[in-house]
Image (cartoon, grey):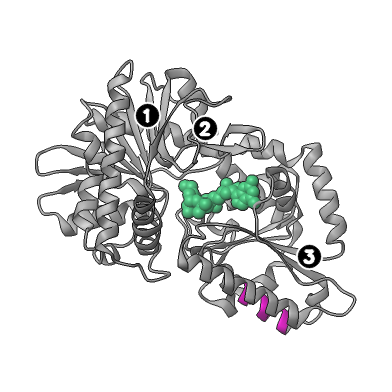
Amino acid sequence: MPEVERPLVVVANRLPVSRGPDGWQASSGGLVTALRPVIEEAGGAWIGWDDDPDGVPSRVDGLDCELHAVELTVPQVRGYYHGFANRTLWPLFHDLVVQPVIDRQWWQTYEAVNRRFAERVERVLQAAPATALVWIHDYHLMLLPELVRQRSGGSPIGFFLHIPFPPPELFARLPWRDQLLNGLLGADAIGFHTAQYRDNFIRSVQRLFSGVTAIGDTLVLPDGRQVRAVAHPISIDADEFSELANTDDTERELAELCDQFAGRKVFLGVDRLDYTKGIRHRLQSLELLLERNPQLRRETAFVQIAVPSRDDVQEYRQLRTSVETEVGRINGRFTEPGHDVPVHYLYRGVSRTALAAYYRLADVMCVTPLKDGMNLVAKEFVTVQAASKGTGVLLLSEFCGTAMEFNDDAVRTNPFDVEGQSYLMESVLGLDEVERRARLRRMAEVVRAADVYRWVHDELAGIERGSLGL
Ligand code: GDG
């Protein structure tokens, strides 16, 4: 556990709670799990946007943390969230996989909402029992570090970006590039998943601001203040996933799936339905694979879990239509009379137990994003497979953060090369079992050695050090 004695104030777009059939509960993600011990030790608060019509409670069972909901109007949500965050920043920061929309009204709303968050942070800090550490998350709140600095009374401020930071040539296309950099530079430490994203950020600062010096991972601003830009890869709770791999419930779900897919090799995809995840390219590769190999039409199954995401945004609705058209075409072309369809498409999330069972079932896990900050699905898969002595292969895009950590133990793919990817899908089926296990073991060791607890520790310690100018 990190040696943090200060109260912690986390600021993120969303609060870490959701309303289920039995009332409000803490979210099950790795970030919340990893922060729980820190918050319980030193006290803490979480500030985030509340979109529940009846409001969010100030505490929920199982999470010893004050919840502070920021209410936003419908036009604010439209401009700040659906607009600037998800249609301008998201595509720009994912290497223009689709074209970002530049809209001045959205930008003004983004600024206004960041100010609203800053006012709330100020109020929470004033009520805190001691100088708190403020930890701000993600691209929705890039102006917040500087706004908080102006009002914080000396609190250490950290920012973590969960998505890639683009190369300076792409970032420079944004009309408000200087304002965003200035906002981020209000932090004492800025965290990125990889050294490459951090270097992109440092190069952008140097390209756009004169008088900033970079010494290693420290930026010295013209007024002498120092800001650290660090690479801290996010991860998962490896113990939790290792346990989940072998519970009775997981075994039960797995037994059902094994019956359903008996005698077939299973390819698996698990993603939010997002155009960055490479789902269409993956399906096109599958189509080529089945076109070339008629026997595989009966001998393989492709399961795609597509978790609904951002369906208020036009590009996401279009993506859903094209993915579903693709699935229909493949099944229409290749389903043989008396046999199951080749593609099983689930447009929904599944329970964590079912997810673990699918990870165990998969012979080939396809994590093939066109661009992805890290990708936790890949880390979860290798952890579950290694814990259950599986022999699954990870087909991993070279354009995600996880690829930097797994090196050649994952089978690397370039998802833009649809045909090349289809040959890889074919060849991985022939990989030797001993070799597969050894690869899984090594990848699972990488995940265990740098799990989400380590990430929280490194981040918080880095923010403390940054605030002391060390
Ligand atoms: C962003 C960045 C970065 C998925 N399907 C189900 C389900 N999931 C869970 C997975 C995993 C999480 O959702 C997805 O995390 P990813 O990292 O893969 O992707 P993003 O949602 O795009 O996350 C990404 C991440 O932030 C963290 O910084 O790695 O690059 O884009 O944990 O398990 N969970 C359940 N059912 C599902 O069907 N229960």
The total of numbered circles placed on residues is 3
- Is residue 129 in view from this perspective? yes
Please give the label number shown on residue 9.
Answer: 1
Looking at the rendered structure, the kind of residue marked 2 is Ala
Q: Which residues are magenta?
A: 283-291
Q: Are marks 3 and 1 in contact (CB under 8 Å)?
A: no
Where in the figure is residue 14, as x and y percent of width and height?
45, 42
Looking at the rendered structure, the kind of residue marked 1 is Val
Q: Residue 285: within the magenta?
A: yes
Q: Earlier in the sequence, mark 3 or mark 1?
A: 1
- Residue pictured at 29% horizontal, 66% vertical: 102
Mark 1: give few (<14), some (14-19) or many (20+) Cα within 10 Å. Answer: many
412 on left or right of 111: right
Q: Which residue is mark 3?
A: 265
Mark 2–mark 1 distance (CA, rounded to whole Å): 15 Å
Q: Is residue 353 above or below residue 433?
A: above
Where in the figure is residue 76, as x and y percent of width and height?
34, 50
Q: Residue 52: within the magenta?
A: no
Main SS of residues in magenta = helix
Please give the label number shown on residue 266.
Answer: none
Nearer the observer, disc 2 or disc 3?
Answer: 2
Q: Earlier in the sequence, mark 2 or mark 3?
A: 2
Q: Are marks 2 and 3 in contact (CB under 8 Å)?
A: no
Looking at the rendered structure, the kind of residue marked 3 is Lys
- Is residue 376 in view from this perspective? no
Looking at the rendering, in which quadrant would you find the C terminus? top left
- Residue pictured at 19% horizontal, 38% vertical: 226
Q: Which residue is mark 2?
A: 34
Where in the figure is residue 172, as x and y percent of width and height?
24, 64
